[in-house]
Amino acid sequence: MTLIRSLVFYIYMYSLMVFMGLVGLPLLLGPRTWSRGWLRVYLKMLWFGLRWIYGITFEVRGREHLPAGGALVASKHMSMWETLAFWEILPDPAIILKHTLTYMPFFGWFAVKLGNISVNRKKGASALKGMMRDAARRAGEDRQILIFPEGTRVEPGEHPDFKPGAAGLYLNMGVPCVPVALNSGVFLKSYCGLKRPGRIVVEFLEPIPPGLGKPEFLRELHTRINTASDALQAVDDAGMPLGRTGR
């Protein structure tokens, strides 16, 4: 039954993406706000399918920790879900993405139009410099720079070392970094296949103030994100979170 529900959801999600992408193609010629509004319509319909087919909902905690305007946000990464969800959760994010994602039909076209930041890791230091430059430009537009410091999706309970990009942004931007804990991997597989119904929790944690050195910052970020994410993975038989993590 779980496999069948996953197949139904995949058909729904990608059919919806193709339909909305085709209908929304003319919006790519207009201002970015048009594409952003169209994406949020798509997400509303996607969340309907997530709830109806999978029995999965989500809640957001700790919004009070988000500063107004431009910000640096670093999130746990367990599934494709949060790559999309932050477009609704954050006011106007610029997400650090693998450059290969920009080649995807529809998704990639809108990702570029929406002013996300693509990074080709094979280019090494030059890619990092480009990311810093683009992030500074987006932050100057009062947008939230979102990075997944693990660099890839991980399973619940996995705590790999963070990539240096998050530290580079933190040191270069000179602003607080807001860690984000989540538990999407308890309910969804890497590419949004169903594991179990329940409620995904996304929690913004207390910001890390600017001024730390690179090793200290990465240790603090790693501890905060993983401690809080591990706590959110405890759910009851109905898939509901057992309690709140610390702020």
Image: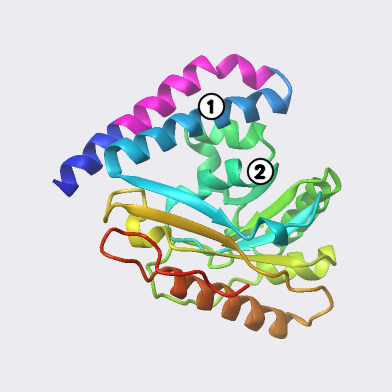
Question: Residue 41: x percent and y percent?
Answer: 53, 27
Look at the magenta stretch and give its main secondary structure: helix
Tag 1 secondary structure: helix
Residue at coordinates 59% horizontally, 42% vertically from top-left?
A: 87
Nearer the camera: disc 1 or disc 2: 1
Question: Residue 92: x percent and y percent?
Answer: 70, 42
Quarter of the figure with residue 181: bottom right
Residue at coordinates 70% horizontally, 84% vertically from top-left?
A: 215
Quarter of the figure with residue 14: top left
Q: Are marks 1 and 2 in contact (CB under 8 Å)?
A: no
State which tag comes first along the sequence, 1 or 2. Answer: 1
Taking depth in this image into account, of 76 and 186 the one nearest to the observer is 186
Query: Is residue 147 shown left or right of residue 47?
Result: right
Quarter of the figure with residue 28: top right
Amino acid marked by disc 1: Val
Query: Is residue 22 shown left or right of residue 8?
Result: right
Q: How many marks?
A: 2
Q: Relative to residue 143, is residue 182 depicted above or below?
A: below
Residue range in magenta is: 12-29
**Disc 2: which residue:** 116
Question: Residue 247: x percent and y percent?
Answer: 63, 72
Taking depth in this image into account, of 192 and 231 the one nearest to the observer is 231
